[in-house]
Amino acid sequence: MSDVQLPLLQTEWLTLQNQFDSYEKCSLVIKLFSILVCCILVFALNAGVWSMLVVAILWLQDGIWKTFQSRIGKRLEVVEQAIQDNPHHAPELLLQMGMQFNLAWSQSRPQAIGLISEYIKQSLKPTVAYPHVLLIALVIGELYVS
């Protein structure tokens, strides 16, 4: 790789990695907000059924957020592979490998049904489902006790 191409890919990697990490932080905020809202609705306002709906909405939002993050992760893998492989291509081709995130994003984005399926798959991953499943169980338990 020439002296120009590697820094471009490194810059892209740094930008994407920072973005990937920020999505993780926002996912945690969604989870904490879900816990707070659920507890307020269940214990302070006694609105059990409504809190289950709010938790479900926040759970899906977390899944959508993690879907965005997974797309960044896929591009990070492409950039990392390009850096690791250190291919001996023409400089123009190497320049095209970097700065392709939005194109790669749009090419990997499925149509509506596929997109909804992708959101649901992300939502069912254990790291996303937690704590939402437990909050729904809490609400159901609270409804039966009441």
Image (cartoon, grey):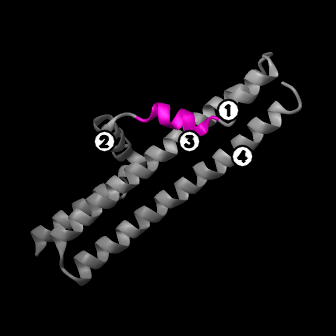
Question: Element under label 2?
Answer: helix
- Badges 2 and 4: C-beta atoms under 8 Å apart? no
* Amino acid under disc 3: Ile
- Counting residues from the start of the chain, the first of labels 3 and 2 encountered is 3
In front of the other: 11 or 51: 11
Given residues 49 and 134, the one toward you in this image is 49
Per the rendered image, the range of residues in magenta is: 100-109
The answer to whether 3 is drawn above or below residue 124 in the figure is: above
> Callout 2: 10 Å neighbours few (<14), some, many (20+)?
some
> As shown in the figure, which amino acid type bears the numbered disc 2?
Ile
Q: Can see residue 96?
A: yes
Q: Residue furthest right?
A: 3
Residue 72 is labelled as 3
Left or right of residue 110, residue 102 in this image: right
Q: Measured from the top left, where is residue 3 in percent x and y? A: 89, 31
Q: Which mark is residue 14?
A: 4
**How far across and how far down the image is residue 101, in percent?**
60, 38
Image quadrant assignment for residue 90: top right
Disc 3 to disc 2, C-alpha distance = 18 Å
Quadrant housing residue 96: top right
Badge 3 marks a residue whose secondary structure is helix
Q: How far is mark 1 from mark 4, CA to CA?
A: 10 Å
Q: Where does label 2 land, which residue?
A: 116
Q: Which residue is mark 1?
A: 79
**Lower position in the chain sequence, tag 1 or tag 2:** 1
